[in-house]
Amino acid sequence: MLNNEQLLHTIQIEIEPALLGINRGADIPADWSQRAIYAGPAGASAWINTVASDRSQPCNSGSHSDLLCAISSLSPDWFISLGPGNGARDRILVSPLLTNNAHMRYVPIDLSLGLLFATISTLVGQVHIPAGIVADFESGSSFIPERLCSRFKSSDHILYALLGCTLGNLDRGENQFADSLHTTMRSGDWLLIEVATRTNAWTFELDPRARHNYDDACRRLFANGISLHTGEAIEDIFRNFEQRVGYDQSLTDVPGCIAIDIMDRKTSRRILRTSRYDWKQLLGWLSERGWTVLYEHNVFEDERCGLGVALVVKR
């Protein structure tokens, strides 16, 4: 029986051409904001350190039970994870999904080669991973069937997942991502999402994400994104974090959603967008984009903020 290290050598790593240079240290595209913070070895390392800190987690363990409830009756042949980070949240789902279908295969997709390896290392030996893909799924998802078409059967059921509140971070907004993914998905495929939510009592001024409420690991993560655009040393940006970083609010593609834009004051460039959704309006938006909601649950952590999980199927 192969050990985990040997299993790693059996996994095919696919790298989209546009991402090959970036993962080797080439300049990042000018329109990359949140994508820049994960880029390169420094970005991958900073993200892994960030998720190890509870204070920096974009979505905490409160949604674990909802994720498990959402997928409890599913029996997918493929589990395709978009931006899994270090794979910790996917690991929660793999065991129950394998109970329903022992032959399920898992494919992680990330724009960072370092984070892709982190995910594979987390899950290797627990689930069959035929391939991992380095790609920018914000720019389109047609690469998924192109890369995996020889492995898909027409009868296969596919579960896509976008966890960790990633929907609210997208540089290009939700509509472009949703339309591209919906086109890629086949009728009957599922999508599992996890988002941060808000009540009518929510205010920008009181949201912890709109203040310097970030630990050192998260500050270095943001500094990596700034550094890749400006060429400044990460440590110089980190030391001046509170003078360098500011916060704005804006609207997103989803009605009722308010984004907190974490900004580099020096360049007026957005570092990261983190969004709070109105739950009912988000569910309506998903339906309008061509999905049917199969499961949804939103739990408020306090009178202002919450976490929501939804499982939808393509019509």
Image (tube, rainbow, N blue to C red):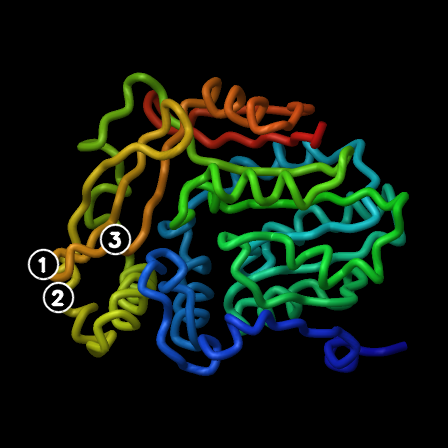
- Amino acid carrying mark 3 in the image: Arg
In the rendered image, residue 285, in percent from the top left (x then y), is placed at: 51, 24
In the rendered image, residue 226, in percent from the top left (x then y), is placed at: 25, 66
Distance, label 3 to label 1, CA atoms, is 15 Å
Work out which quarter of the rendered image holds the N terminus and state it: bottom right
Q: Earlier in the sequence, mark 3 or mark 1?
A: 1
**Between residues 57 and 296, which one lies in front from this camera angle?**
296
Which residue is rendered at x = 56% and y = 64% of the image? 135
188 with respect to 245 (left or right): right
Which residue is rendered at x = 77% and y = 49% of the image? 95
Question: Mark 3, mark 1: which one is toward the viewer?
Answer: 3
Which residue is rendered at x = 13% and y = 60% of the image? 244
In the rendered image, residue 161, in percent from the top left (x then y), is placed at: 63, 45
How crowded pointer 2 is (Cα within 10 Å; few <14, some 14-19, many 20+) is rated as few
In the rendered image, the vertical position of residue 205 relative to residue 139, given as above or below: above
**Between residues 303 and 278, which one lies in front from this camera angle?**
278
Asked if the residues shown at circle 2 and circle 1 are in contact, with their CB atoms under 8 angstroms apart, the answer is yes
| Disc sitting over residue 243 in the figure | 1
Helix, strand or loop for disc 2: loop
282 with respect to 235 (left or right): right
- Amino acid carrying mark 1 in the image: Gln
| Residue 56 appears anywhere in the view | yes
Residue behind mark 3: 270
Q: Earlier in the sequence, mark 3 or mark 2?
A: 2
Helix, strand or loop for disc 1: helix
| Residue 114 appears anywhere in the view | no
